[in-house]
Each structure stands twice: as C-alpha cells, then as structure tokens.
Image: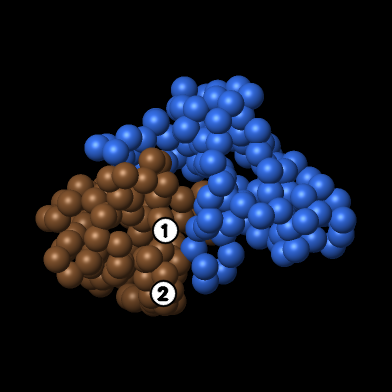
Chain colours: A brown, B blue
Amino acid sequence: QKEVEQDPGPLSVPEGAIVSLNCTYSNSAFQYFMWYRQYSRKGPELLMYTYSSGNKEDGRFTAQVDKSSKYISLFIRDSQPSDSATYLCAMKGGTSYGKLTFGQGTILTVHP
Amino acid sequence: DGGITQSPKYLFRKEGQNVTLSCEQNLNHDAMYWYRQDPGQGLRLIYYSQIVNDFQKGDIAEGYSVSREKKESFPLTVTSAQKNPTAFYLCASSIRQTSNRADGYTFGSGTRLTVV
C-alpha cells in the first residue's frame, strides 16, 4: 500500500464547475500538506500549503485537511480551461527532513 | 529572475551509456532534490541533499549517482546500471527543512530522458 493515494482520473468537467480533488494517506506523522499544479511538460508549481487540520482559501482554491480521517482535498470553484493540468498532493512528517511524499497526480481537463 | 535551470530538455541515451543531467539554482537554497516521474506513478525521490558535500538516497536510488560540490549545482548521473531509465526527471530546491517547518519546493522544467 502506498503512503499517499490519489485517484489519477482523468477528470473532465465543464467550465464553471466546482472541482474536488482528493488524497488519502496512511502515515499519521504527516503534518504539512501541499498541492502542486503541473502543466504538460513542465515542472510542478506550489498551489496551496496547509499545516495540520483545517481549511485554507486562496481565491478560487480551497484546501482542506482532515487529519482524523487522513484525508485532504482541494476544491476549485468556477473552474476555467486554464485550470487544466495535473494536480499533485504532497505531504511531509515532522521528522522527515525535507522529504515530501507525493501522490500519483490527478489529470484535470476543464472544457469550454 | 531566480529559479532552477535543468538541461538538457530532451536527452537520448544508448544502452550501456552513462548520462548526466544538469540542475542549477540561483535561489540561494540549501536543499536540492531529484525526482523521477512516470505515468501513473507520481513523483518518486531519487536523491536529496540538505547541504553542500552531503546527500542522501531516496526511495529509488539504485542506478543513479549525484554530487553536491557547490550550493548552486546538483547534477544527476543515470548509470548503465539503471535498467529502465526512460522517464521525466525533475530537480527541485528549497530552504533547508527542519522537523518543525516545511516549505514548498521550487521545481525546474524537467529533462525527458529516452533510451534508444
């Protein structure tokens, strides 16, 4: 069993839809949770970063962490064709120096 | 502009050859990382370095080697011992991570390696 599980999709939605992307994890030591966006043939870029449980909002994006369920989510409101990318969750424990563990990535397509 | 530069963008390797992928950063980051990305597998850590002249194996280090002689540079050599090297290779950097903090990585644009 992988430490971080993420449904690879692909996920296809119409423009304007609300998108929900999710990851589950097994390592209870994870405390730092991130979402990266990766456009085709490019490196990932950091989108959202949360520490421990709770919600964080940034424009159309909301990140949620539920440590009791070992479940994290990224919501995209009013999705746009420019949101079409692969979304990767990543997480890190308090004792693992610098080592992020990534999910498999979910491929999202937002069609006009 | 600060960032990470990976070169070359595309690389072709013959069977039995060693090849070296370049990664240079001007972000003044202490830590640097190499990941391999395969379809459906996400990013898997090959090697990482928290400081100059020190590096650690990641989850899939077999068949790879690195050096960290300068803060700005972290080259990755894919040796002939790596049986399935065709993949997208990503280099990243960050400030030095500790047990009570974490910061996001800055990634390069990647090198696509193909065995011919």
Disc 1 is placed on an element classified as: strand
C-alpha gap between disc 1 and disc 2: 14 Å
Q: Give the chain letter at badge 1.
A: A
Q: Residue at x 30, y 67 (%)?
A: A26
Locate residue B68, reporting x and y percent.
61, 29
Left or right: residue B25 compared with residue B62 = left
What amino acid is labelled 2 in the image?
A: Gln
Instruction: Say whether disc 1 or disc 2 marks the residue closer to the N-terminus.
Output: 2
- Confirm whether residue A81 shows in the render: no
Quadrant in which residue A14 is drawn: bottom left
**Location of mark 2 (residue):** A1
Residue in the foreground of this view, choosing between B97 and A107: B97
Q: Would you place residue A84 above or below residue B18 in this image?
A: below
Disc 2 is placed on an element classified as: loop
Q: Residue at x 52, y 71 (%)?
A: B40
| Crowd tier of the residue under label 1, counting other residues whose Cα lies within 10 Å: few below 14, some 14–19, many 20 or above | many
What amino acid is labelled 1 in the image?
A: Phe
Residue in the foreground of this view, choosing between A80 and B69: B69
Residue in the foreground of this view, choosing between B109 and A98: A98
Q: Would you place residue A102 above or below residue B109 in this image?
A: below
Q: Are marks 1 and 2 in contact (CB under 8 Å)?
A: no
Q: Residue at x 46, y 50 (%)?
A: A44
**Location of mark 1 (residue):** A102
Locate residue A51, reporting x and y percent.
20, 47
Left or right: residue B76 compared with residue A8 = right
| Crowd tier of the residue under label 2, counting other residues whose Cα lies within 10 Å: few below 14, some 14–19, many 20 or above | few
Q: Residue at x 49, y 63 (%)?
A: B42
